[in-house]
């Protein structure tokens, strides 16, 4: 996958099928857009599938600070690449680009620089100065500039539209099963395994520690049943997201996973942790023995959850 990031002066050299959106979470609704452009590219090998998104998000720009995301930039890149997207454009969002009028944006970038033959967007799409461009704008300008436009209605879950905001609320409530249903896959925290204080080793329960990216949204601090992807395969386990108050009690958030029947050294390796079910809030124990006893209970509960002997 080719990545064009942080620049406004770019040029694609072939026709493109473009999906426009923020793609925070890359949920089921987003995937419909992506499926459309990938299918268009498959039908015509001369057409490239292109994702057009923004970095930072418009919300972060107008808030004046980086906001927590369901998916970080690196996570989005990995998802798009795995889905088979040809080109990802991370358009710089700043005061100058945010002031571009919708018509000018359509002509300059979608038509001239991206050579769009097909544009796919959600029914709630907005773009251009003060969000003046919308689905109707894309359809109307398509007739003028000669591109096809497909507007995708919201995907629903339990009768209500799926949105990044709705998924955020479910994560904050620890409703991970609902998050999985709306995303189409379990919520993930990914990163490189780092060294901790090795307390897990001391009590016979070593963990793989990942420090979430600063802009990564996490749910309630506490214990989750989880599934972890490593270079060696997929493993079940339990994961604690929090500040480890019993042994550290600092402000550094850590995602630490105990993997069943796993004894390999994976320090420095990239892993992906899927949070399947929220079990209990994080708490401080009076001693390591109490912590170990509770971890044994959590581990046995996890084995039952994963149907492991």
Image (cartoon, helix red, strand yellow):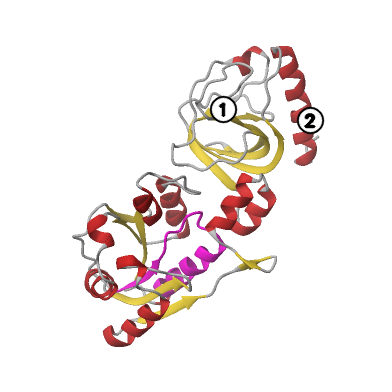
Nearest to the observer: residue 242 or residue 269: 242
Left or right of 132? Residue 157 is right
Q: What residue did someone put label 2 on?
A: 300
In the image, what residue occupies the spot 27% across and 83% down?
Answer: 145
Of mark 1 and mark 2, the one earlier in the sequence is 1
Nearest to the observer: residue 187 or residue 139: 139
Dot 2 surroundings within 10 Å: few (below 14), some, or many (20 or more)?
A: some
Q: Position of residue 222 (x, y in %)?
A: 65, 33
In the image, what residue occupies the spot 62% across and 38% down?
Answer: 220
Q: Position of residue 269 (x, y in %)?
A: 47, 31
Q: Quadrant of the N terminus?
A: bottom left
Q: Is residue 23 visible?
A: yes
Q: From the viewer's perspective, is residue 257 above or below residue 86? A: above
Read off the magenta span.
15-41
SS under mark 2: helix
Q: Does the segment drawn in magenta span residue 94?
A: no
Q: CA distance from mark 1 to mark 2?
A: 18 Å
Q: What residue did someone put label 1 on?
A: 208
């Amino acid at each position: 996958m080719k990545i064009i990031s942080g620049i406004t002066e770019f040029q694609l050299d072939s026709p493109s099928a473009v999906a426009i959106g923020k793609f925070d979470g890359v949920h089921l609704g987003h995937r419909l857009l992506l499926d459309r452009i990938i299918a268009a590219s498959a039908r015509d090998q001369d057409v490239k599938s292109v994702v057009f998104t923004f970095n930072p998000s418009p919300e972060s720009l107008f808030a004046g600070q980086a906001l927590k995301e369901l998916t970080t930039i690196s996570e989005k890149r990995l998802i798009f690449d795995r889905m088979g997207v040809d080109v990802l454009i991370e358009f710089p969002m700043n005061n100058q680009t945010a002031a571009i009028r919708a018509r000018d944006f359509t002509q300059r970038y979608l038509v001239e620089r991206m050579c769009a033959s097909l544009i796919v967007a959600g029914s709630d799409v907005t773009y251009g100065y003060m969000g003046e461009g919308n689905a109707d704008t894309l359809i109307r300008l398509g007739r003028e500039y000669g591109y096809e436009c497909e507007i995708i209605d919201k995907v629903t879950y339990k009768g209500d539209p799926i949105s990044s905001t709705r998924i955020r609320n479910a994560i904050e409530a620890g409703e991970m099963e609902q998050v999985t249903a709306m995303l189409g896959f379990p919520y993930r925290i990914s990163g490189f395994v780092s060294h901790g204080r090795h307390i897990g080793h001391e009590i016979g329960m070593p963990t793989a520690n990942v420090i979430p990216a600063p802009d990564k949204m996490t749910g309630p601090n506490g214990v989750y049943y989880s599934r972890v992807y490593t270079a060696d395969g997929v493993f079940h386990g339990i994961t604690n997201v929090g500040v480890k108050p019993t042994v550290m009690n600092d402000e550094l958030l850590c995602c630490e996973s105990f993997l069943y029947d796993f004894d390999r050294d994976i320090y420095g390796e990239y892993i992906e942790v899927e949070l399947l079910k929220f079990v209990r809030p994080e708490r401080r124990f009076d001693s390591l023995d109490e912590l170990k006893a509770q971890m044994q209970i959590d581990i046995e509960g996890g084995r039952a959850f994963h149907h492991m002997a």
